[in-house]
């Protein structure tokens, strides 16, 4: 009986391993191209909603729809979509950064700061995240912290330019 139990455990372990290797256990990314102008936010919301209805695991469809909501200043909807995108893709610095913008739009500076910090933790070589956090510090009146982040962003940009 014990041999059967161990064999069954091994089968389950191998199945889980194979699912992970072939992407079955990973949230899907939206491979569809939207038929929308980049600034046609209503179209982006509608198209991404269709994609999400067909594939509820399309993390980037939630993220893109969240971005469209953000630009329409519908911050609660944007944050809800970014939350779902992060649930599906928890290591996306890009999504943390975008949710930070929406929190900043709501003037929820503490949550925005936490998201900028997480984006930087995940991608410390991305100048955009330091710049975003710098603007947040500037808006909060934290000039010395803003200057530190702006300088770090400039430093990272210079490193990118070097051949």
Image: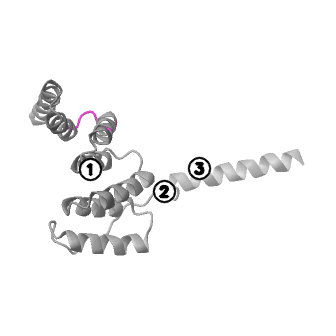
- Which residue in the structure is indicated by mark 3? 17
Q: Depth check: give the residue in front, 48 or 70.
A: 70
Task: Report the side of 59 relative to 5 (left or right).
Answer: left
**For the residues carrying marks 1 and 2, which lies nearer the camera in this image?**
1
Q: Depth check: give the residue in front, 66 or 140.
A: 140
Q: Is residue 163 visible?
A: no
Q: Work out how far the residue at label 1 is from the one at label 2, CA to CA, in angstroms.
A: 25 Å
Q: Is residue 91 above or below residue 64?
A: above
Q: Is residue 45 above or below residue 79?
A: below
Name the secondary structure under disc 3: helix
Find residue 85 and report its horizontal and vertical position in percent: 38, 56
Closer to the chain start, of discs 1 and 2, is 2
Magenta highlight range: 122-126
- Which residue in the structure is indicated by mark 1? 98
Label count reads 3
Identify the image quadrant of residue 36. Answer: bottom left
Name the secondary structure under disc 2: loop
Quadrant of the image containing the C terminus:
top left
Q: Residue drawn at (20%, 63%), measured in percent from left and top?
A: 72
Q: Is residue 121 visible?
A: yes
Q: Work out how far the residue at label 1 is from the one at label 3, CA to CA, in angstroms.
A: 32 Å
Judged by its main secondary structure, the magenta piece is loop
Q: Is residue 76 above or below residue 47?
A: above
Decide: marks 1, 2 in contact (CB < 8 A)?
Answer: no
Within 10 Å of disc 2 (Cα), the crowding (few <14, some 14-19, many 20+) is few
Magenta stretch holds residue 125 = yes
Q: Residue drawn at (12%, 28%), measured in percent from left and top?
A: 143
Q: Mark number for residue 23?
A: 2
């Amino acid at each position: 009986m014990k041999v059967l139990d161990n064999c069954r455990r091994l089968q389950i372990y191998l199945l889980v391993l194979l699912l992970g290797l072939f992407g079955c256990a990973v949230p899907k990314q939206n491979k569809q191209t939207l038929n929308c102008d980049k600034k046609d936010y209503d179209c982006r919301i509608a198209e991404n909603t269709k994609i999400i209805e067909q594939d509820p695991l399309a993390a980037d469809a939630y993220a893109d729809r969240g971005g469209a909501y953000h630009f329409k200043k519908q911050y609660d909807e944007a944050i809800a979509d970014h939350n779902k995108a992060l649930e599906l893709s928890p290591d996306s610095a890009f999504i943390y950064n975008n949710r930070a913008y929406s929190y900043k739009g709501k003037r929820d500076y503490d949550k925005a700061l936490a998201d900028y910090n997480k984006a930087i933790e995940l991608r410390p070589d991305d100048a955009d995240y330091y710049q975003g956090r710098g603007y947040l510090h500037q808006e909060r009146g934290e000039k010395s912290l803003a200057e530190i982040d702006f300088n770090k962003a400039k430093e990272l940009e210079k490193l990118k330019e070097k051949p």
